Image: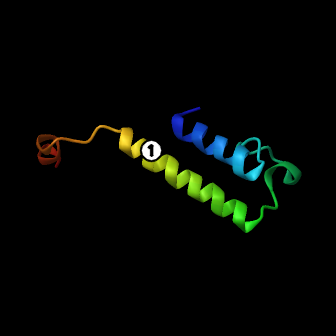
Amino acid sequence: MNQLDTILTLIAEMHLDIETLETRHSDRLDFHDVAVWRIKEALHAAFMAGCEVGLQTPKASEAEIAAQP
């Protein structure tokens, strides 16, 4: 599981009470009733996680940007 999948799975568990984002080929396991405020919380958490990752990611130098085709 890559970093993005791990983050999204944690958000789904914490905010939506969904234990996995893997398809399990069962309506009972793959479809969930979720309140809109919980979806909003999950989206906010995903946005904030993206901001954190962006802050930790090294930025390209001017030379690297200029070298791109």
Residue depicted at 54% across the width and 34% down the height: 2
Left or right side of 62 for 50: right
Q: Position of residue 24 (x, y in %)?
A: 79, 43
Left or right side of 40 for 48: left
Q: Nearer the viewer, residue 47 or 33?
A: 47
Q: Nearer the viewer, residue 49 or 31?
A: 49
Residue depicted at 59% across the width and 32% down the height: 1
Q: Position of residue 37 (x, y in %)?
A: 71, 65
Disc 1 residue type (three-letter): Glu
Q: Position of residue 22 (x, y in %)?
A: 71, 42
Label 1 element class: helix
Residue topped by disc 1 = 52
Neighbourhood count class around disc 1 (C-alpha, 10 Å): few under 14, some 14–19, many 20 upward: few
Coloration of the structure image: rainbow
Q: Position of residue 61 (x, y in %)?
A: 17, 41
Q: Hey, which quadrant is residue 42 in on the image?
A: bottom right
Above or below residue 57? Residue 38 is below
Left or right side of 13 for 31: right
